Amino acid sequence: MYSVRPTEIDKRIISEAGQIISEGGLVAFPTETVYGLGGRATDPLASKKIYAAKGRPSDNPLIVHICNVSQLNEVGCDIPDGAIKLAHSFWPGPLTLIVKKADIIPYETTGGLDTVAVRLPSHPVARALIQASRTYIAAPSANISGRPSPTEAIHVIEDLGGRIDCIIDAGRVDIGLESTIVDMTEDIPTILRPGAISLSDVEGVLGEARIDPGLLKTDDGSRPKAPGMRYRHYAPQADMTIIKGPAGSAVEEIKRRVLSDLKAGHSVGIIASNETAGTYGKGIVKMIGSAGDPSAIAYNLYHILREFDETGVDIIYSESFSGEGIADAVANRMIKAAGGKIIEVGS
Ligand code: TXA
Ligand code: MG
């Protein structure tokens, strides 16, 4: 295994990495969302290797990455007009479309489903690699299953070093959260995982769309449709709780809890906005971005969760962040990282 960091797209490295994929090996590579762990999407053995390297349940399907829009018709079939419209509006970019799978994509890649997730990434290294591999690349996020997705090559090395053939290091990714997944096999196009492309972006193109009801409800037994959204993903090693409420009250509640946890001998981390970070006297405080800048918060979230893993804190408190679009994706990932633990405080 080796790791390389090209300053500009180095054709030799890309062609070597493409060769590894076409011969059935595994390459971690940057996309604009998070780093992916790629293998040949048409090769059942390569998909099995991906599951094994990540320690991922084999019923959790992989995303097939393509390098031009026309390949949607090669990996999928019966493509609805809406999918074509979304592809032309948002590809290349952080959008994954679920369509019926073509025979060329084996069930090992789709976790046994008759549908396939397809994405055309915008990162130039990702696109060059897919082209050089002369195939389609099945790639989940390049983390050990259950850990926060990697936003830098060092995260991939921490999780998968020694288990894969090559890592292409192109620095830190732009977005920091995984792509928006839209299921185009439902009567109403359905967002199965929120990301940088929002519900209103999708509605703007299709007229009608919705969020998977299984994502919104947790108390009536309904389950998210995307298998990966059912697991406690994105999790830090510490026990994380989100404190929700008006800024002043949430900060006071976090301070009170931090003091009592410190007294009990725990080490405590705090995820705070740039505006409130200076007001905490105790605990290890990480600034996640300005409360009004959800893209910055998305960019920093997984990075901070991994930093807390490194530091080895026992408990994390996070202020709560919510809103539309990428802010909704941040809230979704934070709730998953906290295993659903949210405490509401009044004014
Ligand atoms: O931004 C991204 O999408 C990144 C980069 C590497 O492209 N990839 C990524 O892959 O996040 P992964 O495997 O970590 O997440 C894929 C998600 C899982 O929740 C999986 O259950 C869902 O997509 N998925 C894949 N195929 C599906 C299908 N046919 N039906 C429903 N959900 C599907
Ligand atoms: Mg993942």
Image: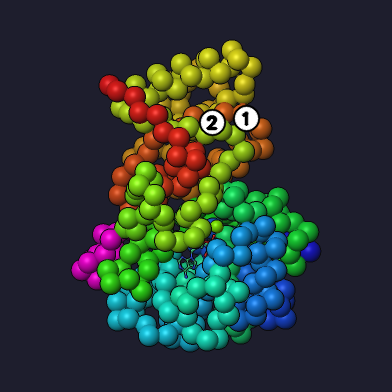
**What residue is drawn where x is 46% and y is 16%?**
256
Q: Is residue 100 magenta?
A: no
Q: How many marks?
A: 2
Q: Secondary structure at mark 2?
A: strand
The disc labelled 1 sits on which kind of residue?
A: Val
The residue tagged 1 is 313
- Of all residues, the one furthest to the front in this rendering is 221
Q: Residue furthest left?
A: 207
- Which quadrant would the N terminus be assigned to in this image? bottom right
Q: Estimate the x, y position of residue 290 in percent, counting from the top left.
A: 39, 37
Would residue 107 be seen by someone viewing this image from the given angle? yes
Q: Is residue 299 left or right of residue 128?
A: left
Image point (58%, 68%), residue name: 139
As drawn, is 306 to the left or to the right of 203? right
What amino acid type should be assigned to the residue bearing mark 2? Ile
Examine the structure image and report whether residue 198 is included in the region drawn in magenta: yes
Gap between marks 1 and 2, in whole Å? Answer: 7 Å
Give above or below for 133 relative to 35.
Answer: below
Residue indicated by mark 2? 316
Most extreme residue toward the top is 263
Stretch of the chain drawn in magenta: 197-210
- Percent coordinates x, y for residue 333 in the rendering: 46, 47
Q: Quadrant of residue 77?
A: bottom left
**Badge 2: residue crowd in 10 Å (few <14, some 14–19, many ≥20):** many
Residue at left offset 65%, top offset 54%: 144
Is 219 located above or below residue 72 in the figure? above
